[in-house]
Image: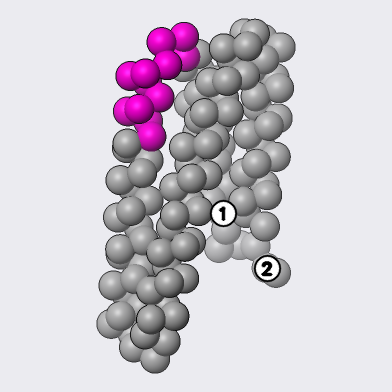
Amino acid sequence: MVLMWQLIATASIAAVAGLAAGRDGAVSAALGGAVNIAAGAAYALLWGLGIKAAPGSAAMSLVAIFRAEAAKILLIVAGLWLVLSVYRDVVTVAFFAAFIVTVMIFSMAFFVRE
């Protein structure tokens, strides 16, 4: 559910940025959202795998959560660095707007009931 909202927000920001700043604005916003979406997907995958490995152990559950969070942070830092160093025509306002909005949506996952 959270991934869907992140994708919708990224597409919306990319559409607005595309109208305001052209192709580079749309691509920048899409990349900003993609950095956090990829990190969130890796977090979910690693956390899920860690919980399945030791379903009854609280200590292993904590290890799985910390490992997933570390991977998420590493992917965010690497993704931000990669985009900002490789994509020369990045529109920073669009890029960081999409990134920040997707971070906020991920942090609200706690409040979503499925």
**Is any part of residue 22 visible from this angle?**
yes
Q: Residue at x 43, y 58 (%)?
A: 43
Q: Is residue 6 above or below residue 99?
A: below
**Is any part of residue 104 visible from this angle?**
no
* Left/right of residue 75 with respect to residue 42 in the rendered view: left
- State which tag comes first along the sequence, 1 or 2: 1
Magenta span: 79-90
30 falls in the magenta region:
no
Q: Secondary structure at mark 1?
A: helix
Residue 50 position, x and y percent, is 38, 74
Categorize mark 2 by other alpha carbons within 10 Å: few (<14), some (14-19), many (20+): few
* Left/right of residue 16 with respect to residue 34 in the rendered view: right
Residue 45 position, x and y percent, is 47, 62
* Left/right of residue 18 with respect to residue 63 in the rendered view: right
State the residue position of label 1: 108
Q: Is residue 73 above or below residue 15?
A: below
Residue 100 position, x and y percent, is 50, 35
Give how far apart the Cα atoms at labels 1 and 2 are: 11 Å
How was this image coloured? one colour
Image quarter for residue 81? top left
Report the amino acid beneath label 2.
Answer: Arg
Q: Residue at x 36, y 85 (%)?
A: 54
Q: Is residue 76 above or below residue 12?
A: below
Q: Is residue 84 above or below residue 105?
A: above
Q: Residue at x 39, y 91 (%)?
A: 56
Residue 12: mark: none
Q: Residue at x 61, y 62 (%)?
A: 111
83 falls in the magenta region:
yes
State the residue position of label 2: 113
Report the amino acid beneath label 1.
Answer: Met
Residue 97 position, x and y percent, is 53, 27
